[in-house]
Image (spheres, helix red, strand yellow):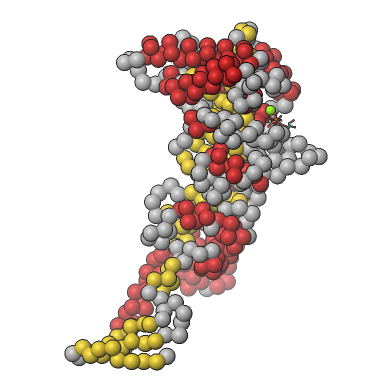
């Protein structure tokens, strides 16, 4: 390094140092001032206290165990301390054996979280975030985002990170493949629930590999949300159906049928009480016709479908006229039940419809329902194979969207909205096996109107036998259009 004097200040010399490091061509440094040893010691002690405080705050149980063991050894000697420890371990293991659920919740998962924190995330954090490009260098000093918390369960690790000031979650979403590889996970999903913080979800095992059996009928009728399957943490997943419209997109064989039937199944008790009406449009005649008796109205041919949609529009307009100035939202009742219009293969009625007049009527009715229906209790649940705009130009009118297996990566953002794939909605990578149709079938990424983070869910498989059982229990006299 070549040193040179920049300019003289009274009492101190400011020197410039030509650095050999590439990103700091010239470093201006003041003359070194000797710091008294006491100042250095005080700073070190302060850092030690802060570090200890932070460790106790972040790992209270581990610190309490370490502190308690040290206290026992000091008070009783190491032999007695060992006996006390042995007794404690026996007592806690017996408790966990007697109440396994509580044992997993309070013992196993916290211990696993701590271990994953120490061994995977803390150990590799700086190097992985640096290589992934999330570290910033300001005036020669490197700043890394702060790893705050790791919560592990049977299926995933959820890592809470305090971002650097000025960073945003889209940057993390772009780097998510690097983070996933860095921490040895197959995938990393990024979500941000409050400013400045980001949560990285790393799946460890796939809860959705196995087929989810049809959900039990709800004990009490519920119209607002329906238990349709399982999320990737192994918990039941409830899909909102009332007060929204839902679009389901997936390639052929992706399992759209299991989503439609799971919704129907969950709504049947409410339909039985007259709080819900299910109107089915089945232009392929191959899916919903199997449970024809479950639907209050059913249409198969394009003409019938157009009429049924127009009938839904008429109900919607009649209700809107009655509600105007009186109420602003719909409460399901036997007088005004929630009407769910279920459309399988909607593109058969729109893009692939050769009769122009019919096509115009159907598009107009669908657009009217999806723009005005939800406030008056008329919802649309539509499934389609091809999400391109020319196939369904009104797809943006569906607030909630579900992407099952798709053929191309670009289709993911078409269905779920911009940036969804970067955030980990890898719907184009959902596995498929031509010799076993159940592989990956029903697995989907759900993006809701009020939550931009995609959630990975597998719909329950409603088999033919399940549909027959539903028909036996809940059949209604269906009206043909
Ligand atoms: N949730 C699921 N779990 C396990 N297997 C499923 C599930 N959903 C569907 N399958 C299997 O996948 C096959 C195809 O499913 P489905 O007919 O629902 O697909 P689709 O998306 O409607 O296809 P298409 O567009 O051709 O109608 C089913 O016969 C079934 O064997
Ligand atoms: Mg189908």
Q: Quadrant of ligand 1?
A: top right
Asked whether 206 or 351 is in front, the reply is 351
Front residue of 237 and 85? 237
Q: Quadrant of residue 49?
A: bottom left
Give the quadrant of residue 124. bottom right
Seen in the picture, residue 467 relative to 415 is either above or below; the reply is above
Horizontal relation, residue 216 to residue 127: left or right:
right
Asked whether, in this view, residue 83 is left or right of residue 165, the answer is right
Residue positioned most to the left: 10
| 127 shown above or below 307 | below
Residue in view at x 52 percent, y 11 percent: 311
Give the residue drawn at x 74%, y 37%: 438
Say if residue 201 shows up in the picture: yes
Q: Quadrant of the C terminus?
A: top right
Quadrant of the rendered structure where residue 303 is?
top right
Depth order, front residue of 93/208: 208
């Amino acid at each position: 390094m070549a040193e040179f004097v920049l300019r003289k200040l009274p009492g101190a010399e400011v020197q410039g140092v030509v650095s050999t490091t590439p990103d700091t061509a010239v470093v201006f440094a003041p003359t070194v001032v000797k710091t008294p040893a006491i100042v250095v010691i005080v700073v070190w002690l302060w850092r030690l206290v802060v570090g200890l405080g932070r460790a106790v705050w972040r790992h209270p149980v581990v610190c309490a165990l370490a502190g308690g063991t040290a206290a026992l050894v000091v008070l009783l000697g190491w032999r007695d301390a060992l006996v006390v420890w042995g007794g404690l371990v026996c007592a806690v293991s017996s408790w966990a054996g007697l109440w396994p659920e509580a044992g997993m919740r309070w013992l196993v998962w916290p211990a696993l979280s701590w271990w994953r924190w120490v061994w995977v995330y803390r150990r590799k954090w700086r190097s992985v975030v640096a290589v992934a490009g999330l570290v910033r260098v300001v005036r020669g000093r490197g700043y890394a985002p702060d790893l705050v918390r790791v919560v592990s369960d049977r299926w995933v690790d959820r890592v809470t990170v305090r971002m650097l000031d000025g960073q945003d979650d889209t940057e993390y979403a772009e780097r998510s493949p690097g983070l996933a590889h860095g921490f040895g996970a197959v995938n990393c999903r990024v979500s941000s629930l409050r400013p400045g913080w980001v949560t990285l979800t790393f799946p460890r095992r796939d809860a959705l590999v196995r087929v989810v059996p049809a959900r039990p009928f709800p004990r009490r009728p519920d119209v607002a949300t329906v238990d349709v399957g399982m999320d990737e943490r192994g918990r039941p997943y409830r899909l909102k159906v009332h007060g929204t419209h839902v679009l389901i997109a997936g390639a052929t064989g992706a399992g759209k049928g299991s989503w439609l039937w799971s919704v129907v199944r969950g709504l049947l008790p409410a339909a039985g009480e007259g709080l819900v009406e299910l109107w089915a449009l089945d232009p392929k005649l191959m899916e919903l016709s199997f449970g024809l008796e479950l639907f209050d109205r059913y249409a198969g041919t394009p003409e019938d479908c157009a009429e049924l949609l127009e009938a839904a529009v008429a109900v919607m307009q009649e209700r809107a006229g009655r509600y105007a100035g009186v109420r602003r939202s719909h409460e399901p009742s036997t007088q005004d039940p929630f009407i769910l219009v279920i459309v399988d293969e909607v593109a058969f009625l729109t893009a692939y419809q050769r009769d122009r007049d019919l096509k115009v009527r159907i598009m107009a009715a669908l657009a009217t329902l999806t723009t005005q229906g939800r406030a008056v209790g008329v919802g649309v649940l539509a499934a389609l194979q091809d999400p391109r705009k020319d196939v369904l130009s009104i797809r943006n009118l569906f607030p909630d969207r579900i992407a099952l297996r798709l053929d191309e990566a670009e289709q993911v953002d078409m269905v779920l909205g911009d940036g969804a794939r970067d955030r980990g909605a890898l719907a184009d990578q959902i596995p498929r096996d031509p010799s076993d149709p159940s592989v990956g079938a029903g697995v989907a990424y759900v993006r809701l109107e009020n939550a931009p983070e995609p959630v990975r869910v597998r719909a329950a498989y409603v088999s033919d036998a399940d549909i027959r059982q539903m028909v036996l229990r809940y059949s209604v006299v269906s009206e043909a259009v």
